[in-house]
Image (cartoon, helix red, strand yellow):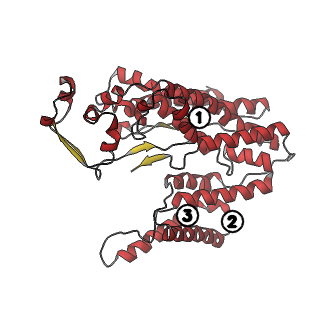
Amino acid sequence: MNSSRKTLLIQVSLFIITFTTTTFAGSEWINSSYFPWNYSWQDFIVGLQFSIPFLGVLTVHEFGHYFTAKYYRIKVTLPYYIPVWLGFLGAPSLGTMGAFIRIKEAIKSRKEFFDVGVAGPIAGFVIAIGVVWYGFAHLPPQEYIYEIHPDYQIFGENYADIVYEKDTTIFKKDINFLSEDVMAQLPDTITYDQDLIVKFGLGKNLLFLLFEKYIVSKPERIPSKYEMIHYPFLFAGYLALFFTAINLLPIGQLDGGHVLYGLLGSKKANMVSAIVFVLFIFYGGLGLITPASKFGDNPNDLLTHLLYIAMYVFLLYFVFYSMHPNKQTRWLIALSVFAGQYLTTLILPDVKGYHGWLFFGFLIGRFLGVYHPKALQDEPLSFGRKVVGCLALIIFILCFAPQALVVE
C-alpha cells in the first residue's frame, strides 16, 4: 500500500471513529445514556440528531477550505478529524476536537490567504444557520424535558427558576397530581442543593437571541440555558457557531487572521492582531484572581494568594510566548495584563470575564502564533473581497458569545 492510500485510510478511519464518538456524545447529552452502561441501539439513533448536524457543519467548513485551496492548485490534504470521547469514564464530551486540513506548500499571495481562510467559516455558517433555524422552528412541547427530568413536572413551566435558583426539598408523599409512571421514577425525597448542583449551560450569542425573538412561535417552549444541551439541533448548532467564532477571531493564522491580513496587509494586521489578542486574554482572565480572593482563614492565606498570583503570571508568560522574542518583554506583557486585571477587579469587584478563553489563548499564543506571515505577492484585495471580509466580521459578531459554555 503506497503512502497516499495509507493517508486516505487514516483519514477515512478517523472520520468513522469521530462519527461514532460524536453520536455517543449526542446520546449522552440528550438523555444521559452512557456507552456501554444502560445503552441501546435506540440511544445511538437518538445521538444521530446531534452528530449529523454537528459533523455536517464541521465537514462543510473544512471542505470550504479544501476546494478553495484546490482551485488555486495549492497542495492540500483531505480533512483529519480528531475524535475525543470520555463517555467510558461517565463524563460528557463532544466526541471530537474538530478537524483540520494540512496545506503542504506555501501560499503565494494575499488574495489566496484571504480566499482560503474565509471560505471555510462562510460555508459552515450557512449550514449552521439552517441547523439553528430548524432547531428553533421545531421546539418540542414542555413534556419533552419532563421525559428527561420527570421531577421537573412538580414545578411546571417555571422549573428553571426553582431547580437552578433555590435550595428546595420535595417529599414524594406530598405529591399527588403526577401520573403513576412518573411517580415510579421519582425517589422518596428530591433535594435541590445549589451548592451541589453543577450547572452546565450555553451562553447567548446575537444569532440565538434573534432566533428566539423572531423564529420561535411559542416562546414558552424555549428551554433554560442549562437544559439546551438536551435539544440536539440547538446544541449542535450552537457548537457550530461557537467554533465558527473561534476560527474567525482576527488573530494570527486563524481563519479570522487570514481575513484580517487580506484586508489590512501585514503591518496593520499584525498590530491589530496583537491588540485583539491582549484584550481577549485580558477579558478571559478577569476575576480569576482578585484582591477579594480567599484561600482560607489561616495565617498563610497571604502566601497562598501570592503563590496563585505567581502561577497565573507564569501561565500568562506562556500565553504571550509568541508575541515577542525577548523574554523580559514577555514577562512585562504578562505582568502588565495581570496588573490591569487586578486593578479592574479592585475598582469593579463584581466584574468577571470568561476563563475558558484562557485555554484557547494558550493554544494560540504558544502554538499557533499571534502574527500572520507575509505572502510573496502582497497586493491589496479587490472591492468585492473587502465586502466579503466585512461579511466575515459580521458573522463573527453574530456567532461570538462572551460567556460561551457556562459552568457554575
Residue type highlighted by circle 3: Leu
Which residue does the numbered mark 3 point to in the structure image?
Answer: 316
Residue type highlighted by circle 1: Tyr
Q: Would you say 182 lies left or right of 223 here?
A: left
Residue occupying image coordinates x 70% and y 55%: 273
Secondary structure under the numbered disc 3 in the rendered image: helix
Residue 278 drawn at (x, y percent) = 63, 60
Give the alpha-carbon distance from disc 1 to disc 3, as whole Å.
Answer: 30 Å
**Depicted 311 relative to depicted 9: above or below:** below
Residue occupying image coordinates x 53% and y 57%: 284
- The mark found on residue 325 in the picture is 2
Residue 28 drawn at (x, y percent) = 37, 33
Q: Quadrant of the N terminus?
A: top right
**Depicted 28 relative to depicted 191: above or below:** above
Secondary structure under the numbered disc 1 in the rendered image: strand
Q: Earlier in the sequence, mark 2 or mark 1?
A: 1
Residue type highlighted by circle 2: Pro
Circles 3 and 2: CB atoms closer than 8 Å: no
- Disc 1 residue crowd, few under 14, some 14–19, many 20+, Cα 10 Å: many
Q: Would you say 131 lies left or right of 161 here?
A: right
- Disc 3 residue crowd, few under 14, some 14–19, many 20+, Cα 10 Å: many
Mark 3 or 2: the one toward you: 3
Secondary structure under the numbered disc 2 in the rendered image: loop
Residue 270 in sight in this render? yes
Which residue does the numbered mark 1 point to in the structure image?
Answer: 80
Mark 1 or 3: the one toward you: 3
Residue 13 in sight in this render? no
Circles 1 and 3: CB atoms closer than 8 Å: no
Residue 104 drawn at (x, y percent) = 71, 39
